[in-house]
Amino acid sequence: MSNLVITRGNAAFSHCAFTFDDGPMRIPVDAWLDALEQGGACGTFFLTGEWFDRYPAKAREMIARGHELTTHTYHHRRMADVTKAVFFEELKWAELAYQEATGRPVPTFMRFPYASYREENLEWLREWNYLVIEGEDTVDWSGPPSAQLVERVTPKLDNGSILMFHANEIAKETPQAVKSLVHHAHTKGLDMITVSDLLRANGIRAGERSWQVRFKPTLSNSFLSDQWKSVADEDELRKLAADSLEWGNPKAPTGSGAYGKWLQELSMQSPSDGETRFVVRSFAGQHWAYVRASIRGGALILEDFATKEAHADAIAYILQWAAHEASTLGCEWITSTQDMRLIHKLCEQMGFEAEIVLQEG
């Protein structure tokens, strides 16, 4: 078997990994999370790009709760049957969905749907420095009762084992089984860790990949410069914090003390060592958007932005501001790692030359 395929961890360590494929589409994933967390365990979830696009808030929540997420292609295709072009398209779109949902680079390990691949697929994966994670098939994809699943899987719980479960409608008995299996793992003295931690114990450090959209600035006659102004004082910042907290911005906190936390976040310097911009779009006595950007290496980098309205046209106003600002500054490119696919499509419609490319470094 290729050294790209990892089937278990280091048997010298008392740990194992609970892994889950697919992602529920019609039932919540919370039952799987609760089953793990009640026993102090964490899981690694191999999820499709479609899932990340449907549930970005849940993806961020799962990471915040200590679980690990990575990709499982975009459409759950049987990859042994696809062309090389489709193969890389599935990987790329899954990566973009993951990155847009989580705001994080993509771990370079995955699992093939149906464990279906051919040797040529592994050579293609090598081009992107990927690993494939396999392990002990629990056969929960057949929908067995939880007691049967526990009986089948308990003997497979040992040092370095990787257990392959599913998180979907068919495997609805799996959460109940996982509760018992977590208990059995503790009884055997096993810690339940993420795949990344298991790989590190094997002396393997998985890589990461990160994409960005970039487009060339073009001045627009429709740019409404009078609607944009810098966030120049504390009063403006406080009003923006109060207004934007209601926009459903995934980066904004919720719950008790949300306003204070969000005000502090907006007060922080842009995460760059270059020159910065912090502007808001305002009219009719309201804030409608904000942008935090930096200028570095001949590019205007959109570090963070949000809009009051959820539709795509609200982003178009931000792109117009960015094009005007970049042209004024003499920047060659405007870049963003946020809403990359939407920005790319809008740029096509607005006549901006745009592309989605891997970030260097």
Image: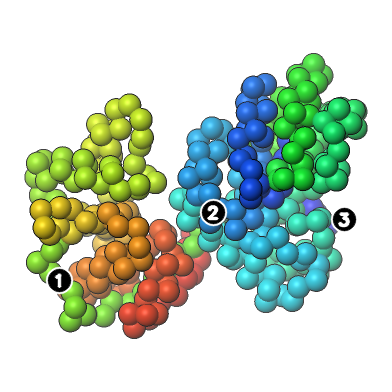
**What residue do we see at 79% from left, 38% from top?**
163
Q: Disc number at residue 224? A: 1
- Nearest to the observer: residue 141 or residue 337: 141
- Bin the neighbour count of mark 1 within 10 Å (Cα to Cα): few under 14, some 14-19, many 20 and up: few
Q: Is residue 18 left or right of residue 286?
A: right
Where the N terminus falls, by quadrant? bottom right
Q: Mark 2 to mark 1: distance in Å?
A: 33 Å
Image location of residue 35, percent across then percent down:
67, 28
Image location of residue 351, percent across then percent down:
34, 83
Q: Mark 2 to mark 3: distance in Å?
A: 35 Å
Front label number (2 vs 1): 2
Q: Please identify the quarter of the rendering in which residue 121 is found.
A: bottom right
Query: Which residue was labeled with disc 2?
Result: 54
Looking at the rendered structure, the kind of residue marked 2 is: Arg
For the residues bearing labels 2 and 1, Cβ distance under 8 angstroms: no
Query: Which residue was labeled with disc 3?
Result: 1
Q: Secondary structure at mark 3?
A: loop
Front label number (2 vs 3): 2
Q: Is residue 120 left or right of residue 86?
A: right
Looking at the rendered structure, the kind of residue marked 3 is: Met
- Nearest to the observer: residue 301 or residue 76: 76
Q: Mark 1 to mark 3: distance in Å?
A: 60 Å
Instruction: Tell me if I can see residue 13 in this picture.
Output: no
Instruction: Tell me if I can see residue 235 in this picture.
Output: yes
Image location of residue 40, percent across then percent down:
64, 22
Image location of residue 113, percent across then percent down:
76, 57
Q: Secondary structure at mark 2?
A: helix
